Structure formats: C-alpha cells, structure tokens
Amino acid sequence: MPSSVRAGNLKDPDVAELFYRDDPEKLFADLREIGHGSFGAVYFARDVRNNEVVAIKKMSYTGKQSNEKWQDIIKEVKFLQKLRHPNTIEYRGCYLREHTAWLVMEYCLGSASDLLEVHKKPLQEVEIAAITHGALLGLAYLHSHNMIHRDVKAGNILLTEPGQVKLGDFGSASIVAPANSFVGTPYWMAPEVILAMDEGQYDGKVDVWSLGITCIELAERKPPLFNMNAMSALYHIAQNESPILPLFPSFPSRTKDAVRELDNLQYRKMKKILFHEAHNGPTPEGGEEEEVGYLLRTGTVGSMESSQSVPSMSISASSQSSSVNSLADGSDDSNEMAMMTEGEHTVTSNSSIIHRPTDNIYDDPYQPEIDQQQPSSAARRRAYYRNRDHFATIRTASLVTRQIQEHEQGSALREQMSGYKRMRRQHQKQLMGLENKLKAEMDEHQLRLDKELENQRNSFGGEGDKLGKKHQAILEKEAAIAEEKKFQQHILSQQKKELTSLLESQKRQYRQRKDQLKEELNENQSTPKREKQEWLVRQKECLQQLQAEEEAGLLRRQRQYYELQCRQYKRKMLLARHNLEQDLLREDLNKKQTQRDLECAMLLRHHESTQELEFRQLGAVQRTRADLIRTQHQTELTNQMEYNKRREQELRQKHTVEVRQQPKSLKSKELQIKRQFQDTCKIQTRQYKALRNHLLESTPKADHKAVLKRLKEEQTRKLAILAEQYDHSINDMLSTQALRLDETQEAEYQVLRMQLQQELELLNAYQSKIKIHTDSQHEREANDLEQRVSIRRALLEQRIEEEMLSLQNERSERIRTLLERQAREIEAFDSESMRLGFSNMALTGIPAEAFNQGYPNPSPSSGPGGWPSRPVPRSGSHWSHGVQNSVAPPSWRSQNSCSGGGFSRAESITSGLFLLEEVLSHKFREGV
C-alpha cells in the first residue's frame, strides 16, 4: 500500500477487510491495563458476547509519523491473520475507534521476563529448556512459511495459564524472507540485522541468534551488554564475537560470596538475639523467615540455586506481596517427577508446557481465598473454566506502574533509538526507491533498444521481400522477352533468300550452258541432228541433276545450320539466364551481408550504451549509499556526543546533589563528635570527682585548698586539651569528608570519561569497519559489473561470429546449390544435344567452314536486320561482399574461348569448384 494514503483511510477494499466495523467499547468490558510500551498499551478485557477473556493492544496512529504507524498496524494485522499454530498467539480481530486500533488476541498471563521480575532470580535449566522448546516450535512454523519474527526476547515469549508457550508481539515481523530492514530491540539484535543495509539481506537465522540471547537472559536475568548504552551495544554486537554463558567459572566465587553472606547473617542474627534478650527478653521465632527474605533480597541464594539443576525450595518475598498467586485450584500430582512449593513451577521440555504450580501463584483479588485439599484434575479444569473470565496475571503491579511512568515521562535514549531506527528505515527506503527507479530506467532502456532492433529487423525483412519480388519480376521478364521464334524466322528468311539466289544462279547457268551447248553443236556440222538432240538432252539432264543435287545440298546445309543455330541460341540463352541468376543471387547475398553487418553494429552500439548506463547507475547507487552511510555515521556520532553530554550532566547533577547534601552529613558527624566529646567530658568529670574525694580523704585538711586548686587547674588544662582535640577532630572530619567527596566524585568522573571514551572508540571502530566494508563492497560491485559486461561482450561477439559463420555457410550453400542446378541444366541440355547429333564443339562455336560456304555469322549488336540483342555470357565475374570486402576474391568464371560461345559442361563444373574453393579460403579472412 502506498505511503501517501492517509492514515485510517478504508477506501481500499483490501485494507477495509482487515478491520471489523463494530464499536469495540460495546463489545469489550472490564478493561485493565497490564502493560505499556512505545507502541501503546495492552489491556485485560472481557468479551461481552461470550464472556471470554482477551488481551487488547491499543495502538494510536495519530501525531508524528501517522502514515508510518498506520502501515505498521496494517502489516501486523496481515501477519497475525496468517498465523495458525499452537505456539503463536491467537488472533481474534482488529477494530478501529477514534484513531486507535484495537488489536484483540488471546489472553496470556505474562511473559518469560515477568518470571524473572517476580522471582528475582534466574530460571533453572529445565525451565529454560521448556520455554526455548516452545519458542523454537513457533519459530520453526514461521520460518517454514518464509516469515521472520525479528524481535525474539523474553518479553515477547508469552505464557498461558495452562503453561503453553506462545510467541507474541509481531509488530517487527517480516512476512517475506529474506529481508533487510533495521528492526528489533538492540540487545537482542543479530549482527545481520544491524548490518542489513551494509551487507545485504538476512533470513530466519536472526531469530535463532535472538533466541540464544534470550536463553542467556533467562539464565542471568539480563541479556549480554545490558549495562552498556543501547547504541554502543549495537556497535559492539556488530563487530565482536557472539556472547557465551559464563556459568561455571563464576560458580566458586558466587559460592564464596554466599558463604560470606550467610556468616554475616548469622552474626547479625545472634547480635539481635542478644540485644533483645538484654532489653525485651526472648525474641519470637522468626529468624528463618528473615534469613530467607534477606538472602532472596540480596539474590545470593537465587544465583547459587540457578547454577544447580535441582528444584528451588525457597520463595521470593516479592512474589508473596504481588499479584502472583493464582486461584486456589491447584494440587500436587503424585505422578509428577518434580514438585515445587508456592511461587515455583515445573516444566517438561518434551511438551513445552509449563505445568501449573502445586500451590496458588495466580491471585484473584475479587475472590476470597479458598483452601481446598488436593482437588482432582477434573475439579481443577472446572475451576479453570469457571474462573477464566477473572483477572489473573503474573505481571506485578509495580512493573506495570513503572512501565506507565517511563512511557509518560519519556526517555531521551528511547527517542534517540526510535529516531535512529526511523533514519535507517528512511535510508533503506530511499536506497530501494533509487534502485527501483534505476531498474525501471534500465527496463525502459532495454525496451527501447529491443524495439529499435526489432524495427531494423522488420525493415530488413521488408527490403528482403522487395528484393525477392524484384528478382522474381526480372526473371519472369527475361523469360517473357525470349525471341527464339524471331531468331528462327530471321534464319529462315536468310536461307530463303539464299535458296532463291541459288535458283536464279542455276537458271542463269542453265541458260548459259544451254547456249554454250548449242554453240558447240552448231560448230560441229558433221554430227547428225538427232544425235545432237540426244546429246543436248543428256547434257541438259546432267546439268539439271547437278543443279538439283546442289539445291538439295544447300537445303541440307541450311537445315543443319538452322538446327545448329537454334540449339546454340538456346544454350546461349540458358547461359545468359544462369548469369542473371548468379547476379541476382550475388545481389541478394550482398544485401543480407550488409544487413547483418548493420545489425551487428547496432548490437555492439546497444551493448556500449547499456554498459554506459549500468556504470552510471552503479555510480549513482554507490554515491547515494556512501552519502547515506556518511549521514548515518554523523547521526551516530551526534547521538553519542549527546549521550556523553547527558551522562556527564547527570553525573554533575548527582555531584551537585551530593555537595548540597554534604552539610547535613557533616552536621550529623559533627553532632556525633560532639556527643563523644560530651561523653568524654562527663567521664573525665566523674574521674576528677573520684580523684578529688580520694585526695581529700588522704591529705590533711589544711592542704585541701591547695589540692583543690591544683586539681582545678589540671581539670581545666585537660578540658582545654579535649577542646583542642574536639576542634581538631571537627576540622579533620570536615577536611577528610570534603577530600573524600572530591576524590570520589573525581574517580566517578574519570570512570565515566573512560567509559564514554571506550564507547566512542567502539563507535569509531564500528564506523571504520562499515566504511571499509562499504568500500570493498563498492569495489566488488564494480568488479562484478565489469566481469558481467566483459562476459556479455564476449557472448555477443561469439554470437556475432556464429551468425557470420552461419551467413557464410548459407552463402556457400546457396552458391553451391545454384551452381549444381545450373551444371545439371547444362548437362541435361548437352546430353539432349548429343542425342540430337550435336557435338559440344559445334555448340560452343561455329566452324570456319560454315562461313566459307556463304553463311556469315550475324553480329549480336546488329539492328533490326541482324540477330536480336541478347545477353551473352560474360568473360568473368566476382562473388564479393557488398559491405566489407577488403580483399577482392578472384574471378570464378574462366574466359570464353570465342566471342559468341558460352560455358561448356566441363567449364561450368570447373568454375563452380573454383568458386567453392574461393569462398572457403576467404570465409575467415573477412571481418565480422
């Protein structure tokens, strides 16, 4: 939910369904405050609907940070709704009234810390084991659902009246794991939580650390470093080893202290007995009660017993006078393995349930005491259910009152810690906001690059389609304008003219020959006319036969020439089409190569821009983190200085009070010395009286006056000496007391200064460690980014190389396929020509004899009267790149043997093999 939403706004249906709309003041009655903290107050209450006892946690979301408080309430309610386990507090609902959230939960008698507060001594090992077992079951349930408690301590481990252990106070819990928020109570915080923003995220293991600190707390009545400033404790936890329980090494010293206290107690008791016998007679029997009370007040017996694994048989005096006694419904069970007297309790670690005491430890102030003789377990259960709606708690009234007073008076240290936590959360929120902003910027940048690449690919695809259609149109156009019939008609018209010319020439020759024969006959007069006619007829027939043969030969030669020219023309057109296909394929491949080069250049440009953006974003995050850490360190130093000033001011106030109270102390001591002086004077006066009487009795009466005068002078002299001693004692006492006070105050001031200096040095060491860790983290992040960028660049170059290799393979494959197809077409054409009787030599070139017989080869460039203009095979061509072709490949087609011929089958295959060799040789020499 966004933080900008006003606190208490229920317009969001997801938030509205978390709260009940009923008025909680009408549903719950008999509210009694049983706890207080920074969050608010906890009340005992009774549900009027079913007369059930519940606990209500009131949390206000007004004043400063109201939105933050509202978000914390929503988070805690959502967390409690997810809990379903015997070792977690049971959630009953949440209500809103007058800017206050009423969080209703099941009622528990108190926490494990209340046991320490009531009994004034540590718990036994078996009791700690049972409490720890129940807490571990609850934590295991939370961790199995990826939740973290983050505030495990004795005060948050609650106990029900049957002795069930439950985890409570989920205000600092995290619904997701891992997390990286700075929350919790300082003395119980794990190092991972303290260094969350510096070292990254943490998981449920932090609860295990806090539970270990809780075990030490239960065994020593306070957590480690509890005598240290809370802020200093944070710095100490973050950079030192984990604490241990120093149980056995202190056991002998504690035992000696206990023996010494017992001896002193016995001495005082005997002195008191003798004093009372001397004045008032025998004292009543109550020494043992005084002894037990004194030992428990000093904590000696408790500490000694806590180091042993045996049940304690004593009771705290404070537990007798507080509301710790329960209803009179408990009794001994003969099957129990351990028994405890009033105020004590027995635990079983395998069930994590603390059994109820044999005597009453829960006192109901509204019910008279009931003395029952060991009721049965059924009667005990009936009594429990009958009295479950009555007020029962193990929290002392003094504890509740002290918590209320501390909350009302306020604490500078608590405000300082809450401000420090708030600052850490704000820093984390600011850093996360910056990371999310940069991530959105990177996503937008990547989307823009992908769109640009896709547009380029689409453009290249459209250009490829247009080029393919263009090539198809060219091929179709070339096929449509083939003029084979016109070429045939041209040859036939030429041959017809040749035949007509031959016939006319034969007619002329026939007439000339006929006239010549007639002249020859006319010259020979002796030959008979009939013979002449016969001879002339034979000559004519012979001439006609020769002309017919000549005409038939011409027709045969024309037919052969016609068929050869048509076949040769078809072959030339086939080679011309092959040349055109090769040109089109070359253009297509060069276009693809150009597009691929442009795409690779764009990919490299995108990589460079992404790399620049990544380094810029990393620099921004690191600068922001460094600024936040600098601000945090400055705040920590300011807080420490304020704490030092406050401690010094408190010490000065204490010393001022001592100085002000010193006259009273000096007056009392002066009165004491005065009384001593008066007693001495009285004694001396009595002694002089006795001496005077003795001397008067032993001396003659005439000397009495001189004796009295001498005694009077001696008495006056001694009284003057006593007066001098009195003045000297008074002055000595005054100087001694003043010097002692000054020395004590100076020693206290030096101790405080040394302690504050140590805390300041601890803070500086902690900040130095954080700074070194931050610098190493920044260096590691920069190295990781450089490594990622280099790997991405290598993968991109490998991808480009693979794509180029694939393109080269495609290029070679298409060229090979085209040449093989063209070779097959040439081979099929030549085979058909051979079947028709044409040789390859005849198809590749016309013999010179054909021109000597009057059949000239028309020029290909002739106009309308010559052959039609057609493309002919070129003398040579190249397969080359269109973009990067620094080394021009050699010609792959050999020179034609004659100007009018094309490729033979052998020449086509040879040229194709030569082309493949050329492509393979230049494939890896060309740049990407």
Image (tube, rainbow, N blue to C red):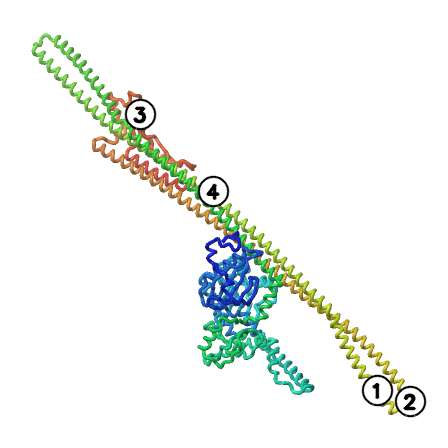
Name the element at disc 4.
helix
Which mark, residue 703? Answer: 2
Q: Are there few (<14), some (14-19), or many (20+) residues within 10 Å of tag 3?
A: few
- Is 898 situated left or right of 293 in this image? left
Q: Dot 2: few (<14), some (14–19), or many (≥20) neighbours within 10 Å? A: few
Secondary element under disc 2, as helix, strand or loop, is helix
Q: Disc 2 to disc 1, how far (Cα)?
A: 17 Å
Which mark, residue 869? 3
Mark 4 → mark 3, Cα distance in angstroms: 50 Å
Look at the picture and state if 818 lies above or below 185: above
Is the residue marked by circle 1 packed among few (<14), some (14-19), or many (20+) residues within 10 Å?
few
Q: Does 176 appear above or below 385?
A: above
* Between discs 1 and 4, the one toward the N terminus: 4
Between circles 4 and 3, the one closer to the viewer is 4
Alpha-carbon span between mark 2 and mark 4: 136 Å
Q: Residue furthest right?
A: 702
* Residue 689: mark in rendering: 1
Work out whether residue 861 can be spotted.
Answer: yes
Rendering coords of residue 846 (x, y %): 26, 26
**Do the CB atoms of the residues marked 2 and 4 lie less than 8 Å apart?**
no
Which numbered disc, 3 or 1, marks the residue closer to the eye?
Answer: 1
N-terminal-most mark, 3 or 2: 2
The amino acid at mark 2 is Asp
Secondary-structure class at tag 1: helix
**In which quarter of the view is residue 526 placed?**
top left
Cα distance in 3D space between marks 1 and 4: 123 Å
Discs 2/4, front: 2
